[in-house]
Amino acid sequence: MTLPGVFEPDRFARAVDAARRHALRPTAGRLTALAILETREDRSLLLVTVVAGNLGTRLPADFEHGTVLFKSCRRTGTILAVEDPRPGQLELTVRVGGDARDIPASGAVALRPYDHLAALARWARELTGIPASVHRLLGPGVLEEPDPGSLLPSDGLFPLDDGQRTAVERSARRSMLLWGPPGTGKTHTLASAVAAMRRQDWKIVVMAISNAAVDVATLAIDDACARLGAPLRPGELIRIGTPRHPQLEEGERPHLLAFQIELAQLNRKLTSLRRSLAATVHIIRKAARSGAEPPARALAMRASLLELIHHAEDDRRRITRAYLDSASIICTTAASFVLLPAPVRADALVIDEGSQMPLAFLYHAAASDPGRLHVVGDPMQLPPIVPDVSARDRHIQPDVTALFGTSRFGLAGVDPTLPGFDAQVERLEQSGGIVTLLDQRRMAPEIGEVVNHLAYGGRLRHAVSPPPPVKAVEGLPAARLVLVTGPATGKATSCHRQAELTARIARQLARGASADETGVLVITPYRLQEKILRDLLGSVPGIRVLTIHKAQGSEAPAVVLDVPAPRNHFLDNPGEARLLWNVALSRAKRRLVLVAPQSIAANRWIGPFLSRFETVTPSI
């Protein structure tokens, strides 16, 4: 196995550009006002007002660090700050290169959000070849190298089972895959390994695709360090990006947010300065329109404010660099890592939810020359999402698929859709290049056995104590696995009548749950059915509605899986459909209710297991 040719910098950059054109569709807008705040020979600073009625679900903050294209003159600027004076209207502080006096104060514009893919393509174009560290960490044979002479000590990192302890100790290797099926403690093991690395005075970067995964890893690492008797100090771990977890948003662990707190103070100062600058420029422009000389005080104020803004921006860059240099642990999304102002040299790079991390981001991360690269995930769960590029880029779709549809597991041949999957896993397990966790503690054994034989060849062991029996609720028996025959025809991917049945079941489960069973997760494969279910359930306490793709990483005592069309190619193909079923079923801890038409019995993946379910035919 050699590194794919798509890793050559020019080819890599072209593929990233094609993915960007698909993934980051521009938002059309109309320029209604423009003020030049500052003009220099090499750059200009503008304050522009844009009316954009089709923002959709995007928030104004999504456009910070993005770009604006002034279509009339084909000039592009970088968005430094976004204000939101009223719905559909954005006030932007924009930096453009060179003199900006040719940019008109009206006309069409195109806004592109937070553009990490453009930064990734620019980075690739600056390379002169595939970096040596990429060969060293992702090249053929690296996973089959023998263990180094020393292993990381795992003493004090409790509780760890045998597989988890092996994974921690082998983290001294140059590269390793950690395969953790649902409920086997992937995040707990990752956090324990990071705590062990910290004990060796290593610098560690922990990276994942989603903010949710980064937050969970951040909290788990904090807990693991505390268990070792060496709690993290303020600034020792920094969280790059936007935390979403309540414990981080609400400041329950302020020692993890020292970086965000200091940056937030500085950003508030910058916002205040920019607003003052905008008001001052308005005074100057008003005087110019009336033919009068601009007030000398206003001109002096503008110069003073511009200088203060430049100093504040320099302070922000300096503070960011100082935290990056001094932190022992950096937790970040892949997108935020691409946008860091300078490379971070780490002793270890740890990837969480690694089955969803595209090679494009691993390539960039490995090029920063970390001493070690470890990837944690489950190749039997969802793979990366492949952008379907436009017709103009169809000739490079294979390169886009290779970079954005392949994970580190896939690059190593650990891909259940490829021939030789089992043999490759066995070979890597023997060499120590992959450690597989086999003791699951999430699912009740009845649910776990379905998942075990569906996706893991019967290798999982149930280390969880049998939970208390579930209670019968209205219309549902006291069984852990229940199939409710739904009214869908099995052909359409949405059915309002079946959604009503699912919503009624979810409410019954939420009302009948005991104190330690609180929480119902409603899952459906299809976005249209998700929308109908959300409309029906509204904000019912204790009930969440997600698609299968959004549900990865979640769990709940009770799961209701609504499948209106179980026989279409999406859920019944010989490849990735099994991964979708695995994710959906393995979210359930104590009770799983499947709502589907009778045609589900013919589904190649779930059909063979339906004899384990107690079937209910409701009166609708």
Image (cartoon, grey):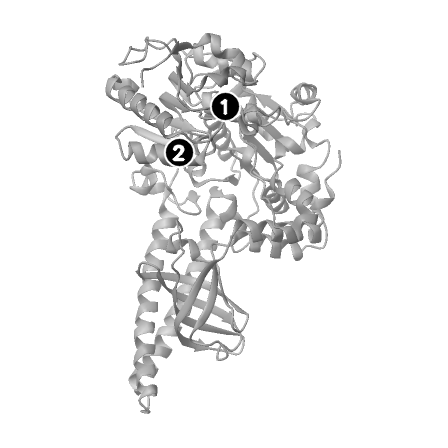
The answer to which of 153 and 455 lies nearer the viewer is 455
Q: Is residue 479 above or below residue 169?
A: above
Q: How many marks?
A: 2
Mark 1, Cα crowd under 10 Å, few <14 / some 14-19 / many 20+, is many
Q: Is residue 376 above or below residue 288?
A: above
Residue 516, image x and y in percent? 28, 18
> Dot 2: what SS?
helix
Mark 1 residue type: Pro
Query: Image quadrant for the N terminus?
Result: top right
Q: Label 2: which residue?
A: 530
Tell whether 226 sits left or right of 67.
Answer: left
Residue in view at x 30 percent, y 65 percent: 272
Q: Is residue 188 above or below residue 395?
A: above
Q: Is residue 582 visible?
A: yes
Which mark lies nearer to you, 1 or 2?
A: 1
Q: Label 1: which residue?
A: 566
Q: Is residue 211 above or below residue 543?
A: below
The answer to which of 32 and 76 lies nearer the viewer is 32
Asked if the residues shown at circle 1 and circle 2 are in contact, with their CB atoms under 8 angstroms apart, the answer is no
Q: Which mark is residue 277?
A: none
